[in-house]
Amino acid sequence: MDITLFSPKGTHSHHFFSLSNQQLQQSNGDQIALDMQTNNNNNIQPQNSCHTSTSRSSDSGEPCADTTGGNKWASKLLKECARAISDKDSSKIHHLLWMLNELASPYGDCDQKLASYFLQALFCKATESGQRCYKTLTSVAEKSHSFDSARKLILKFQEVSPWTTFGHVASNGAILEALDGETKLHIIDMSNTLCTQWPTLLEALATRNDETPHLKLTVVVTVSLVRLVMKEIGQRMEKFARLMGVPFEFKVITGLNRLVELTKETLGVKEDEAVAVNCIGALRRVAVEERGAVIQMFQSLKPKVVTIVEEEADLTSSRYDFVKCFEECLRFYTLYFEMLEESFVPTSNERLMLERECSRDIVRVLACDDDNNSSNNGNGDREEEECERRERGSQWAEKLKEAAFSPVGFSDDVVDDVKALLKRYRAGWGLVLPQGDDNTSGIYLTWKEEPVVWASAWKP
Amino acid sequence: MLDKMPEDTIPNGFVQNSVIAGSNNPPNTAAKKKRNLPGTPDPEAEVIALSPKTLMATNRFLCEICGKGFQRDQNLQLHRRGHNLPWKLKQRTSKEVRKRVYVCPEKTCVHHHPSRALGDLTGIKKHFCRKHGEKKWKCEKCSKRYAVQSDWKAHSKTCGTREYKCDCGTVFSRRDSFITHRAFCDALAEETARVNAASSMNSLANGSISYHFMGTPLGPSVAQHFSSIFKPIPGGGADETIDQTRQGLSLWMAPGSQGHETVGSNLTEIQQLGSVSSEAMYGDHPPPSDYHFNWVFGNNKQSSNNAAEAPAIVSASLPFTDVKEAAATASHHHQLVSVNVPSLYSSQQQQTTTHQTQAAAAAANMSATALLQKAAQIGSASTDPSLFLGSLGFKCSSNINQVQDGNKYCGLMYCSNAITDRHLGNDVEISSASDISSLSQLQMPPPAKRRHLQSDRQAESAGGQTRDFLGVGVQAISCHPSSINGWI
């Protein structure tokens, strides 16, 4: 199979490329030998690493948390490849992609998985087939997606890792405190965690007050996969609220392409309601240019509190610099994959699903540039969802401050709750509180000392 | 009028026995010497109002030599001996001691008024601290805060050991994941579709509100207020340890209905002073007609509720009149007991072997009469009912201490089994099947009739006891392995 780089290719966007051995030997034979030697010192050869084989084997069972930098062959190869792509060094790209292809496996250990998924993205980038690849991956995922599978996935994830529950607990705490004493609550939920945040809030509303307030929950869905299951989720929420004895109203807003289009009217916000805006991982899905406007829109809803939870990575400021963006993306997802590996059992299907979800995100961030949008699509349709470009907490904080929001610190009780939450999980998780510096408003969840999730609360 | 009955000196001022008319008499009416409900003092008692400072003071009696503080004068005197100081131990005065009751200094408090004074100094101290004091003690595991150290200690013992089990059989060690799971569980979906009875639960916040719902059969619109139940028991260190699982809905089908099984309801376990929380367990598993609203909860919020207030009373209303009666009787009896009593019914009419299901153990407090009534009614309506009912009922009512310990044991046993299997801090999903199978081994049901009879006998003999448990469910059985042998 012959691949020429840097031109659109119609047929095999999502296959990893493979070169016939002859081709390789003819063109790159010498080079390979050379490379192997020079790269020896860098431990590129997998035989030198802690991993047991180069082929696609099942995982070695060892967590790849060797963050000392010694044996991370995947990271090195991937970065080199990214550089090669950026430099448009055809033969090098070819060679590295081939190597990665040989070594990678989505069923292997951490390095192999990272190699596999990033290879896919790099390939798409090199062949400018990112959109197509992404679409294919998404449609495959949608086929096997159901309420049951989604529910099982997220509940399992929450059971083994505080990645999402951290934000939930912090936000719920802030919301409950800000809306304490109110009788009509309206929470605008912009998140994609399938409403798993709300049962504990409902329980708290039911039990901690003498008078249970009325809660209206309006969910704004931005991810298509989530949209499919919202109906069922809504029913469950309603039943659960009934069970709890909380007067409850549930509404889902879909069919909305851009968050910025929301208004008070479309959300159904009434004058006498106490509004809380809860944004979990939603801001990063907003187009970069529109983020300020969306935050302004929050102001227009006159909320009592706005809770923002985002993952700590900066894929925005480097979006025009492929290599930097790539490196940051790799850094973040390495942490994430390692976390997944250590949290789940080795044979977990849920982990595999989550990793696949990441693979789609990775392809989208790295290979679906705005420039390519129109050229590949042909008809210039806007993507339903914007590229997920994360930003760090401090960056979001700046934007929020610009929109005249001021940070609300989490109270001691909430911090205690978060600490108690983290204690219930395996070791490795930590909490970083703001040091009193203005920029660091919000609290961070850390995994092996690295901040990974940022949670904050704001008032207008 | 009962007069001149020797006054029981119960330092706790806690009512263990059934009380006769114990209501609010103004302090000056004629003597009725008997033990009173907490907060309803003996009218002839001397009312003492201490200041907040005095109440909070822990060591008021100071040694002049070394400055060491003691809570009581007697202790100080004994200490003074060590300094070779003259000491004197005051004897209890021979004349009749007037009973003392104490009022809370906080004006807004219900116990500020003499008619609601508390009979015990320790009790009033704890009440004041809990209700009006600063919460200085914090649980490490779950970050709950407590004002009274003994509350905190008691909580710490049980924190994290509590197990929550969903209808679908999954077990959780963490309350939050249990709640989240519950909201999405299929069992919930099925059940709310057929809810037709209400359970009442105590409101957490006050600790003393009981909701009484009447559900319409087949109507899914019953709203239940859900809260943990706690039962505040003032005095004697009993405080915080009362855990009760809440009683959920009991779903009942009309007795005549074909092929329907009645579903057990959640049982609330009453926890004894000092005992570890136990939970209501239920098995699941059911043929589709079975559904439940079983909900077990811990006593997380207990501490914030005043221990000294009147116990919350739970009563469940059920569509069947006879059941209701039993329930009413049960709740009435319990009214005076400082325990929450859910009238709990679990009648299992399951054809399958799942007698372990439902019926969570020992939760309901039911008088012997109610128990019998229920057993009779169930016996007539079902095929294999009393097996369970009877056996557990018996067990539980025969010996309160045993039961209580049993509950504790059960809870612990259950918990500890689960805990050992668990990853640190992670929930364990124990398959319901394995639970049931392991438990069923313990249970070896003997013929239903025999048990039923036995239970009746035992239940009757247990009449004098204040707490009758309708112990139904696996837990009780498994709690008494020796008894099981006896049974079987």
Image (cartoon, rainbow, N blue to C red):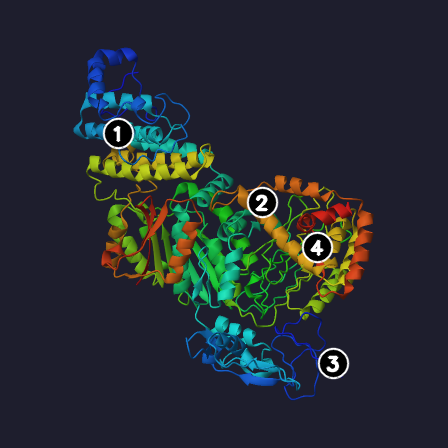
Label 2 chain ID: B
Asked whether A189 or B406 is in front, the reply is B406
Q: CA distance from mark 3 to mark 2?
A: 49 Å
Contact between labelled residues 1 and 3, with CB atoms less than 8 Å apart: no
Helix, strand or loop under label 3: loop
Disc 3 versus disc 2: nearer the observer: 3
Label 3 marks a residue whose chain is: B
Nearer the camera: disc 2 or disc 4: 2
What residue is shown at x 52% (from left), y 57% (from top)?
A: B157
Q: Chain of mark 1?
A: A
Residue A333 located left or right of residue B55? left
* Mark 2–mark 4 CB contact (< 8 Å): no
Badges 2 and 4, same chain: yes
How many other residues sit within 10 Å of disc 3, few (<14), some (14-19) or many (≥20)?
A: few
Instruction: Point out which mark residue B471 bears.
Output: 4
User: Which residue is label 1 attached to?
Assistant: A78
Residue B5: numbered disc = 3
Q: Nearer the viewer, mark 4 or mark 3?
A: 3
